[in-house]
Amino acid sequence: MVCGDIEWEPKLVALRRAMGLEPPSPPRAQPPGPLVPAAVKPNKLRVGEGGGSSSSSADGTRTNSSVDISSSVESKDHPQQVGCTKQGDDQKQKRGRAGKAKEISWLIYGQPSCMKNTWNIRKKIRQHGASAGRVDKYYESPDGCKFRSRKEVEVYLSKGKAKLEVDAITVWVWASLPDFPKTTLWSTFGHALERVLNGTSEEVKKIVSTLNQAEVPSEDVVEVVVSPPFVFLPLVKGVLRPDFHVAAQNCWVRKGGAFTGEVSAEMLVNLGIPWVILGHSERRALLNESNYFVGDKVAYALSQGLKVIACVGETLEQRESGSTVAVVAEQTKAIAEKISNWDNVVLAYEPVWAIGTGKVATPAQAQEVHAELRKWLKDNVNAEVAASTRIIYGGSVNGANCKELAAQPDVDGFLVGGASLKPEFIDIIKSATVKKN
Ligand SMILES: O=C(CO)COP(=O)(O)O
């Protein structure tokens, strides 16, 4: 189960290309057009330290902080694709790119996007000696143990030394202010709530019951959307208070058909699910969803009457190399090229380095990227869309940092994960009043 076909990434892309779901050749990093400053100040955008302790890291539920989405041989044509390596391996990777000790890593096939522990498969090409050119493959456990074969991994797992835990349930809630006059400053406000639990329906009911009892500002101040995994959608929809709404975390890119395991937009509509989250960084990274593919998904979901929360965001490596604005502009452009009506789109800026890490973007960092995104929309779509599109922030939002973030003029709401496990979630919802006031 753990170690399937590791060549899945290129195969997946080839398959999607054959189905017309990818452009004929992989998209190269394009200059993002006039929206992106020609030279992004490399040191200006830094990973924020602010925001207090992270609920998600305290819960130990997400480990993205230890994962660097860096380019690899497979990913260099796809800025969003991943080789999933630990940050400590950056140097090795860089040396690899310089050709000294080529090292490539893949995620293990079949690993769910929300898997708590990330295993790597590394391939090392011998550089010297009689066996130069030979490829050695290693399986690396989340705690750094290396294994030479699948057999060894299986033995290791069977002895219970490592547990591949799956974060079985992720629930987002976000909220916004839908009916407020649509201006940049006041139009919307949102929250997101994500929960990582063991995934039993009892637990889901408990979450919903907490939400149902919470005293939160009225719907004209805050719109709350809960996004459980597919299997819990009907349950949540059935018991959730009527002033909160439900979103799916993904849907298929086109009309439903023989795509076993996928859930189509049509099915969501049929279930009465109004919202869908698309392009989450975990799907982009772990499931190799390209900008192009996400753009297609957004367009198709909208065409079926769904409202879309479209996620964009840069990795730590991209931020540190000064390409944050270029990356989010490129992701937004891929969506803009496929749609003509932004009424039902919420843009979620989620810096990958901030998701589940406790490293929240500082209010200034969030505002800076949100303002750039709004400017991008103004320059490339139109001023009305720029003013009325909600741009919400996600990544280690908690009760301590939400008010200051909410006070930023271009932050229209939140996509919250770990903090939703705690009572502070209610405070996050309440911070919507910052906008109202
Ligand atoms: O992934 C997220 C929402 O999509 C954010 O998660 P955290 O709030 O735990 O960082």
Image (spheres, rainbow, N blue to C red):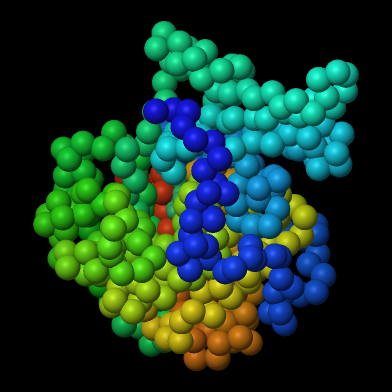
In the image shown, does 247 or 226 lie closer to the viewer? 247
Q: Position of residue 227 (x, y in %)?
A: 30, 56
Which residue appears farthest toward the left when viewing the image?
A: 238
Q: Position of residue 26 (x, y in %)?
A: 63, 62
On the picture, is 205 further left or further right than 189? left
Determine the image quadrant of residue 357: top right
Q: Position of residue 223 (x, y in %)?
A: 30, 69
The quarter of the picture where the C terminus appears is bottom left
Residue found 80% across the figure and 57% down from its top: 43
Determine the image quadrant of residue 31: bottom right
Residue 109 visible (yes or no): yes
Residue 210 visible (yes or no): no
Q: Position of residue 216 (x, y in %)?
A: 26, 62
Work out whether 110 lies above or below 240: above
On the picture, is 108 further left or further right than 300? right
In the image shown, does 86 or 4 lie closer to the viewer? 4
The quarter of the picture where the N terminus appears is top left
